[in-house]
Image: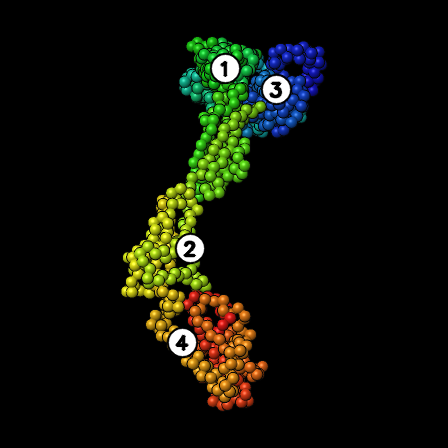
Amino acid sequence: MAGRQRQSRRRAGGRALLAALVLGLCCRAAPERIRYAIAEELGRGSLVGPLARDLGLSPAELPTRKLRVASAAKRQLKYFTVSEESGNLYVSERLDREEMCGESVSCSVSFEALLQNPLNVFHVEVAIQDVNDNSPTFSKAALDLEITELTTPGAHFPLEMARDADVGSNSLLTYQLSSNPSFTLAVKESPDGSKQPELVLERALDREKQSSFQLVLTAMDGGEPVRSGTVQVRVNVTDANDNAPVFSKSVYVARVRENLPAGSLVLRVRATDADAGTNGQVSYSFGNVPDGVRALFSVGSDSGEVRTVRPLDFEEKNKYSFGLEARDGGRLTAHCKVQIDITDENDNAPEITMLSVSSPVAEDAPAGTVVALLHVNDPDSGENGQVSCELLGEAPLSIVSSPGGSYKVVTASALDREQAAEHRVTVVARDRGSPALSSRTALVLEVSDVNDNAPVFEEAAYRAYVAENNAAGAPVVRVRARDADAGANGRVSYWLAGGSAGAAPYVSVEARSGAVYAQRSFDYEQCREFAVAVRAQDGGSPARSSTATVRVFVLDRNDNAPRVLWPAAGAAGAESVPAAFEVVPRSAEAGYLVAKVVAVDADAGRNAWLSYELVQAAEPALFRVGLHSGEVRTARAVSERDAAKQRLVAVVKDHGQPALSATATLHVVLAESLQEALPELSERAAGADSPAELQFYLVLALALLSALFLLSVALAVLARMRRAGPPAVLRCLGAQRFSVAGATFPADFCEGTLPYSYNLCVAPGRAVADGAWLPPPLPSLPAEELLGGEPCAKPSPSSSAGAGEPPAHPDAPQVGKPARLGGEVLAVQLVLKEMFQVSSEPLRCKQLC
């Protein structure tokens, strides 16, 4: 049936397609009603119909038109859904016609199909066809009848009617009675079309022969397949109750208004019984009625009054029909039908449902643009359900009604965002009841802006000052640009557009806030200023932008301490570098230039202004230092009472905040010459590790040993020359000088600054054995052996003669003393090494020291 309806509709729609398209172009697809018919009890996901195709939409239009289901009746939204891909209408929940429409013959669901871009609404109606899904039912499992044995054959006894929730042919009932020779079944048709089964007595009863009968009454509907229900009929044969109750009417009709208070009287039924006594006492009760009827109405068992249990609602159901039963004391029964009609009252205000709102709307939208779709529904009937809508508020908007209770809100004139960024109106819906009821809802329409303004910086050029040594990520400056547009058109983003060479890695800008941050720590000594260009760009399409210049100046900080160039900073602290010293003659007068402290500072300005101050001196009144020149001069004439050794500590300080400083240590020796200062220097050098007195005696012992050694050498040479003859002196004067150290002392040995030197002469003609003139083992002999004097009593390790023995050859030179001489030279060398703190490389002199 649904297929034939769709085919006939498509044939008719083909002829009207051209007219519908033209009308759609002019009126934006004016609404029409689409009808479908489906059977109840369809499962979820069952196809209802090709809604998009019936609306004239192609598959390519579905993503932009956004077809969906919208309805003011909220309980109807759950039944159907539209596929976003195909546009077909599907069942989203099981449909039960009896639950949705009750006993109504026709049942349909109406809702709206909503389209976007442009907005439009279509009315869809789906008819729910009944299927035979309910079997006839009886209210009781068994029916008890009491028939007196005096009842004449042909008497009729009404039985309970079966109830079928289906409608149409599915609810047309027929009855069958199980075979029994004493009883048959007759059906009495009521004026409303219902069929009343009656039990007919076919022959006289004899209680003494058979006191009861067991019959089965079967009710069958007219559906396909046929459904049936049964009830057991138990007949008890009794004596002398030959009159059954009789109602005054077969059908009682009452009309009441909705919202009656609970307990209100609806109607009164009356049945009479011709019998007397208990056989004539009648009681009333419900027949086979739904549970919903028992929840709304009650019947007085003695009075027959039908009253309301709770208030009635016309919108829920406007008509009730049920059966009542009258039973006498002899269990004879009679049945009647009650029909109650509910009249409507204006007890429901109109319901406004906002289907769609197109907000914001561009300010250049033409007049007549649909900005909102709404649906107004009033559940009341008649004039109580007739609704009119209007707009309250000053706005360039108007409301246009559409068939089916839908309304469109359209622009009545051009919009101007600069005058009003939004419009607030109130939609008022009012019915025609008495008294009239109304409802209202607010509609807020935002006006979007066209991107016609570029961002404008608060300043054309920004200046920022940042102290050096800043932390990476520290804020530098914040630029701000304003855009008169709104939304994305007024949303400003910031970017670096360029700048001075090498400035790009220095800073970055946050896109949203315009905050400029340092990318690295600035160094004033490397870069003092740079400039970058910041571009502000809005989010419009096309985007608009402007540019501002940010010039960053790096401020100097006192982050560099003064550096002493002379005397060297490591001279006083490093063990491998000899300490700087100056010799000042004791005859120096006041103002004598001792030395000049030279220092530099990498900072600039006040941070690089240096001043000198003498902070430590053995004789504070003896020396002074120039405040700005750094020259160390004598403050007075040097006297004999002044200590020979003077240690001066000068501090070099800049003028930063806080001030940084460095110290320079200067050693001054008061002596007329270097030879006179040498003992003092030895004491100072040795005093770094041992007490001064021990060092003094050690140097003194070393000097005495050296003198004794030289005297012994001289005596030995003179003795040898005496044995050799008188010309030995002359030969000595003309002899070639020999280096007593041999290969250990190179040719440039006398490049040092020692004030003393010694020469050794050997008589000519005397050959020296290759192994007799051995050099002292400089790398392996410890200084303790040389200074302790023990090696002096031993011969040379290379000599084969023992201690106190004559040499092997009388003409051979005495090689033990030259070896001793080399050891003394080594001892002097080690002393000088300790004095000047030189490296382990031996001193080199051309003359023997």
Please identify, in this view, whether the residue under mark 3 or under mark 4 is nearer the observer: 4
Along the line of sight, the residue nearer the viewer: 571 or 811: 811
Q: Which residue is mark 4?
A: 702
Please identify, in this view, whether the residue under mark 1 or under mark 3 is nearer the observer: 1
Q: Which residue is mark 1?
A: 416
Q: Which residue is mark 3?
A: 126
Please identify, in this view, whether the residue under mark 1 or under mark 4 is nearer the observer: 4
Say the numbered circle drawn on residue 566. 2
Along the line of sight, the residue nearer the viewer: 625 or 779: 625
CA neighbours of label 4 inside 10 A, class few (<14), some (14 to 19), many (20+): many
Q: Earlier in the sequence, mark 1 or mark 3?
A: 3
The N terminus, quarter of image: top right
Q: Earlier in the sequence, mark 2 or mark 3?
A: 3
> For numbered disc 2, what is the local secondary structure?
strand
Q: Earlier in the sequence, mark 1 or mark 2?
A: 1
Q: Give coordinates of residue 464: x percent, y percent.
A: 44, 34
